[in-house]
Image: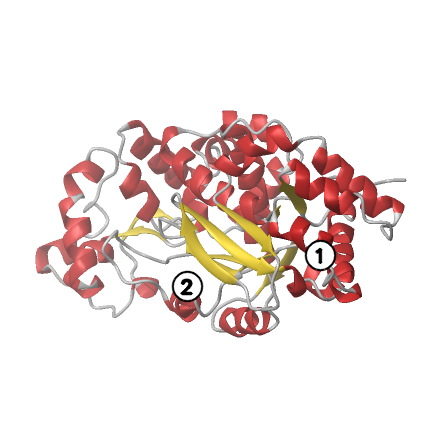
């Protein structure tokens, strides 16, 4: 995270009340920057005051001096990040989150940095480690998309599938760890309720109770919906079972049906069951309205003639429906994307994005990048 040091810190340093505890807290913050876990900025006067502390170790002084040398350029960085920390002089050790000029600011007392356990890199929490890796790739691309020339990222990866993710996030919140959590919305349509996993962590969206936590959901059904058409084409267009899904996603992008593309069930595919009342009132209304659009791409009713005639389905869930319109991709899509993309830099990743997913990459990617903003390790 980028920590903006308030001028009240320079006033504290110059005062008679500046204690060894105060000084150690600043040491801890600078050490985290020197280790490449976080980043600092501030006015020239406050950074000069910090860099001038007699007790700084060489790496800590170098970290402060480096921040001092780029004060002007960091002003542009502050404007582009979606969240930043602000370090102020004060005895209260409880962080406070608020909105300033449309951006989230988390205010920390300098005394909050009382031990290195607090100074670990930001935790990125996903449903599994593949999700976390994809989010890291998104953040690489987003940095390039907003014209940030160079910004290292640092994070600790954590995961917890299903109901366990709520317990993992609760533990992190109790430790006042800095954490950004991204989960699949599992929404079958824009108006659908959040899925069980997303609902498990939704109460942590309370920035007053959990100021060091950010919880986000994918705008579409799953993270797989945010992967670009170029990947699906390269990976699955020649596959005997998965070519149909690859073609469907590309066709929806070409038609400008970006919202619909985000709610396609990439894993289970498109089945006639999706269009029947059993699939729920909200979802049925949405997918029924899209039958004409989808009919121009695939044969919606061709494999479900009996169900079409009866306007009903003998099954009680999509999982057991045999009326497949487009087969889902049961392979590990995220793992395949990581394997194909992890070597690419942000410029290449951003160039491969199509219009249907670019906005989602920017939204999620900049959120993760902002929370994981870091510095180069200081080497002396």
Q: Measuring 25% from the left and 68% from the top, which residue is drawn there?
A: 315
Position of residue 379 relative to residue 113, above or below, is above
* Residue that numbered label 1 is attached to: 15
Residue 366 or residue 108, whichever sits in front: 108
Mark 2 lies on residue: 205
Number of other residues with Cα within 10 Å of mark 1, as a class: few under 14, some 14 to 19, many 20 or more: few
Q: Can residue 277 be seen by looking at this rendering?
A: yes
Is 73 positioned to the left or the right of 116 in the image? left
Earlier along the polypeptide chain: callout 1 or callout 2? 1
Residue 133, above or below 23 = above
Q: Secondary structure at mark 2?
A: helix
Q: Is residue 152 left or right of residue 184?
A: right
The quadrant of the rendering that contains the C terminus is: top right
Nearer-the-camera pick, 161 or 337: 161
Q: Residue at x 48, y 67 (%)?
A: 210
Query: In the picture shown, does residue 254 fall above or below 166?
Result: above
Residue under the point 62% across and 41% down:
42
Nearest the camera: 80 or 113?
Answer: 113
The spot of residue 182 in percent (x, y) is: 48, 55
The tag on residue 107 is none
- Is 132 positioned to the left or the right of 254 in the image? right
Packing grade of label 2 (10 A; few <14, some 14-19, many >=20) is some
Judged from the image, the secondary structure of the residue bearing numbered disc 1 is: loop
Quadrant location of residue 242?
A: top left
Q: Residue 27 is drawn in which quadrant? A: bottom right
* Most distant residue in the front direction: 16
Q: CA distance from mark 1 to mark 2?
A: 38 Å
x%, y% of residue 236?
48, 37
Tell me where residue 149 appears, x and y as whole percent. 61, 26
Q: How far across and how far down the image is residue 208, in percent? A: 43, 66
For the image, the number of numbered tags is: 2
């Amino acid at each position: 995270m980028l920590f903006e040091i308030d001028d009240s810190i320079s006033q504290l340093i110059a005062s008679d009340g500046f204690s060894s505890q105060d000084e150690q807290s600043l040491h801890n913050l600078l050490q985290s920057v020197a280790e490449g876990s976080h980043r600092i900025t501030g006015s020239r006067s406050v950074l000069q005051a910090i860099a001038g502390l007699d007790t700084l170790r060489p790496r800590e002084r170098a970290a402060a001096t480096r921040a001092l040398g780029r004060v002007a350029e960091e002003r542009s960085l502050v404007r582009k990040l979606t969240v930043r920390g602000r370090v102020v002089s004060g005895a209260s050790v409880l962080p406070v989150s608020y909105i300033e000029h449309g951006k989230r600011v988390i205010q920390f007392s300098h005394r909050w940095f009382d031990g290195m356990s607090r100074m670990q890199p930001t935790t990125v929490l996903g449903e599994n480690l593949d999700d976390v890796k994809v989010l890291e790739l998104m953040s690489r691309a987003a940095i390039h998309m907003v014209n940030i020339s160079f910004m290292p990222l640092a994070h600790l990866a954590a995961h917890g599938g299903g109901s366990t993710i709520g317990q993992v996030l609760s533990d992190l919140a109790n430790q006042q760890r800095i954490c950004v959590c991204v989960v699949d919305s599992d929404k079958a349509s824009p108006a659908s309720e959040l899925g069980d996993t997303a609902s498990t962590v939704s109460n942590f969206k309370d920035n007053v109770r959990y100021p060091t936590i950010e919880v986000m959901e994918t705008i579409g059904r799953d993270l797989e919906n945010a992967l670009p058409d170029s990947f699906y084409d390269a990976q699955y267009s020649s596959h005997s079972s998965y070519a149909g899904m690859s073609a469907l996603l590309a066709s929806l992008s070409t038609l400008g049906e970006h919202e619909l593309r985000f709610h396609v069930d990439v894993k289970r595919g498109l089945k006639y069951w999706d269009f029947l009342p059993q699939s729920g009132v909200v979802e049925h209304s949405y997918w029924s309205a899209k039958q004409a659009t989808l009919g121009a791409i695939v044969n919606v009713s061709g494999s479900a003639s009996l169900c079409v005639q009866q306007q009903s389905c003998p099954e009680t869930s999509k999982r057991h429906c045999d009326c497949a319109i487009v087969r889902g991709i049961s392979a590990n899509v995220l793992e395949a994307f990581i394997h194909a993309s992890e070597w690419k830099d942000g410029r290449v990743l951003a160039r491969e994005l199509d219009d249907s997913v670019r906005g989602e990459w920017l939204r999620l990617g900049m959120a993760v990048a902002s929370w994981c903003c870091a510095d180069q390790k200081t080497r002396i």
